[in-house]
Image (cartoon, rainbow, N blue to C red):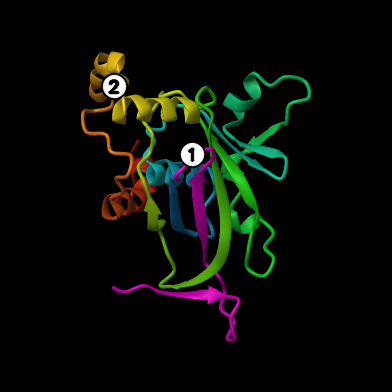
Amino acid sequence: MSTEIAESPRMVWEEPNAIQLHVALADIEPPIWRRLVVPLTTTLAQLHHILQAAMGWTGSHLHRFEIGGLHYGDLDMLNQDRFEGDAQAFDATEVRLRDFHFVMGEGPTFTYTYDFGDDWRHTVKMEKLLAVKPAPKTATCLEGARCCPPEDVGGPQGYLEFLRVLLSPEADEVEEQRHLKRWSGGKFNPERFDLAKIDKAVRGALRRRRRE
């Protein structure tokens, strides 16, 4: 069944039921990014799993959303070690994408942080509202570039050093290069981007979550 996407607003107005998002890792060049279409009823808690699938993370670390100076995520986890003066966290299961303010069909840009040690910050831009026929039940990945860094590589700076040693080691770093190849699975290619594979993972992100 083909899917027809109509931008909103338009000459003949249609009720939007989805939103196009652009997601990019901060502090990484060349950029690692994805463009997604997500149902407008998606909660931030659900969006977390969609972003994990889209980028290729494993979900093994804490996360939070930072929107308009407020934090959203798992209340027990985020408020447990909160210091005086830190932003209070709100429940991500109670906030949906449709709850945000849109101007001329465009919503806010916000930050999704994954792994507070490596501090992977993703810039998420709500690009535009869409009227999709039929109404989407799952998220989809439209396009993107480059693969996700390995987990626990040390954040953006650690990833750059990882790539340097992996791809252009100094004479005394050959053994370290071998170790990094084994550690990263043996065939790590930073330019790899398999749209079909990522789209399948994105479409199934919430179904897999319900089975857990």
Q: Which of 158 and 53 is in front in this view?
A: 158
Q: Which mark is residue 180?
A: 2
Q: Could you say which is closer to the camera, residue 17 or residue 188?
A: 188
Residue extending furthest right?
Answer: 85
10 Å crowding of disc 1: few (<14), some (14-19), many (20+): some
- Find residue 149 and report its image quarter: top left
Residue occupying the point 60% across, 76% down: 9
Counting labels gives 2
Q: Is residue 135 left or right of residue 177?
A: right
Could you say where residue 147 lies in the image, as x and y percent from the top left? 35, 42
Relative to 114, 107 lies left or right: right
Element on which disc 2 rests: helix
Percent position of residue 125, x then y: 57, 54
Residues at marks 1 and 2, CA–CA distance in whole angstroms: 20 Å
Q: What residue type is labelled 2?
A: Leu
Instruction: Name the quadrant of the C terminus.
Output: top left
Looking at the image, which is closer to me, 126 or 1? 126
Which residue in the protein does label 1 denote?
28
Question: Which amino acid is tagged 1?
Answer: Ile
Q: Does the magenta stretch include residue 13?
A: yes
* Pick the front one: 172 or 201: 172
| Residue 192 place in picture, x, y as percent | 29, 45
Give the residues in magenta.
1-30
Q: Do the residues labelled 1 and 2 touch (CB within 8 Å)?
A: no
